[in-house]
Amino acid sequence: MQKRAGRGPIMSSAAKRRRVCPADEETTSEPPPPIMSIPVHLLVDILARSDAATMVRCAATSKPIRRAILDPEFRRATFHGRFHPAALVGFSYVNAGCYTQLPPMQSLRFDAGLLEAFTPVAVRDEIVVLRRRPLPPQEPGCPDPRLLICNSVTGDTTLLPCAAVDAAYYPPALLTVGDAGRDFELLVADKWLKKTQTFSSKDGGWGAVVETNAQLPPHGQVVYIPTGGSSHHAVILGGGAVVYWLCFRRVGLGRHRCIRALDVATKQVTQIELPPDYRWRMNCIEHKKDEALLLATSADGTRLSLLVSEIFAISSWTLEEEGGREEASTRWTRRMLMRKEPIYREAKAMEAGGGPPGRCSVDFKGFGERSGVVIMHMFEAGLVHLSLGSNEAVLVAHEANMAINCRLQLWANQLGVQLTPATKDEKGKGGAVFHRYGTLCMETQAFPDDAVNHPNVKNPLNRTPNHIHSHKHKC
């Protein structure tokens, strides 16, 4: 090492490289603790309260989350205690008055020919039940019109064997549906609700005939008749334990509406009176119409609700705790869902010249128990989408774009496509497949953004050979 005058020693380059930093002589600190991960079951609980897009993103990034989301228990937890409007993917209506010629199709994704002779009578989850219209001659030894089971996910159809009871009056009830529609139980009842019979897909046939406590009415006495229309299907509560039908009670020339309930386990039939003051809230036209009433469920799926089209509003009456018949007046609670006037004013604003609201008459067309969405037709306005969860009403089809006197019918339930043809100018088997109007609805359990891309979901647009009808889709 050399020295310079007046200065310290000159350090060589090798010594410089050998210099040790003081920091290197200190003990190395411990690495920071790893970030704690959130357990999968907590993430799943969070996702159950999230929107569908978030669910899909998380499922794409984690296999454990994807497996948990695909579990049926997750879907049940997702819909427990609330309505999910996003479950309704969309609905559409078809105008058969306008069509375009198409070359013959080799295969159809949906057997549109079924619509010539069958009418939808029940729908739950993936299953749609069709009833064959009475067409002479009746099949020997079969007292009731045949029932056809359609799986709206796979497109499979099964014609059920004849039941031992006459099931042509009360709409059948799907008590349970599971395993993507492959496991179900279907209950049918006779004209008097005296005898019932249940078809089980596991057993592959009808069970024994069960007698209820309902009494056969003497001649000229009270007769209960289920209300007509595609929207008046059975409502099931308690996981298939109790079935409800909206009926009218006829005594001579008198006619009085009520609800009949069947407890499947105890075989007890009871009568529930409607709210005592619901009629005076309706106009003189609607209180005579069955389509102005609709049975539905509460958001938690545990209570029965009755939707009523009143003079100026749509209301919901919810049945509270069960009690005796004398307590009927105190068992119903009313809640106003929407006023009719804003919808009519919106519809009139679309017309040249506008004008005040006209005949405020409503026909209920369907209810989605998963989404909580009600589809209804408001005369002089159009087709309206009403969410029972948010009370939001949207005019989705203007009356000017719809044919007059058409009978628009819609089924709204879970995953799959349900279609109901109109009955105007019906020609029956061998005639036109589509009548003046038909409708369809698509609703999914938890993934509305992805369900339509599932390979097993069928084409929602049904076609006749050589023709495709003018189609309008609303979301």
Image (cartoon, rainbow, N blue to C red):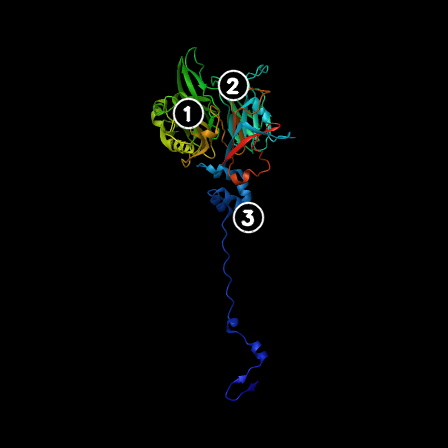
Whether residue 69 is visible: yes
Hey, which residue is sitting farthest top in the picture?
219
Residue 61 numbered mark, or none: 3
Pick the front one: 397 or 150: 397
Examine the rendered structure and indicate whether residue 311 appears above or below residue 221.
below
Residue 142 percent across, percent down from the top left: 57, 16
Q: Amino acid at mark 1?
A: Ala
Q: Position of residue 435 (x, y in %)?
A: 54, 24
- Crowding around mark 3 (Cα neighbors within 10 Å: few <14, some 14 to 19, many 20+) is few
Gap between marks 2 and 1, in whole Å?
23 Å
Label 2 sits on what residue type? Ala
Residue linked to disc 2: 168
* Coordinates of residue 64 in the picture (x, y in percent): 55, 46
| Dot placed on the residue nearer the N-terminal end, 2 or 1 | 2
Question: Relative to 366, is 71 above or below?
Answer: below
Q: Which residue is mark 1?
A: 292
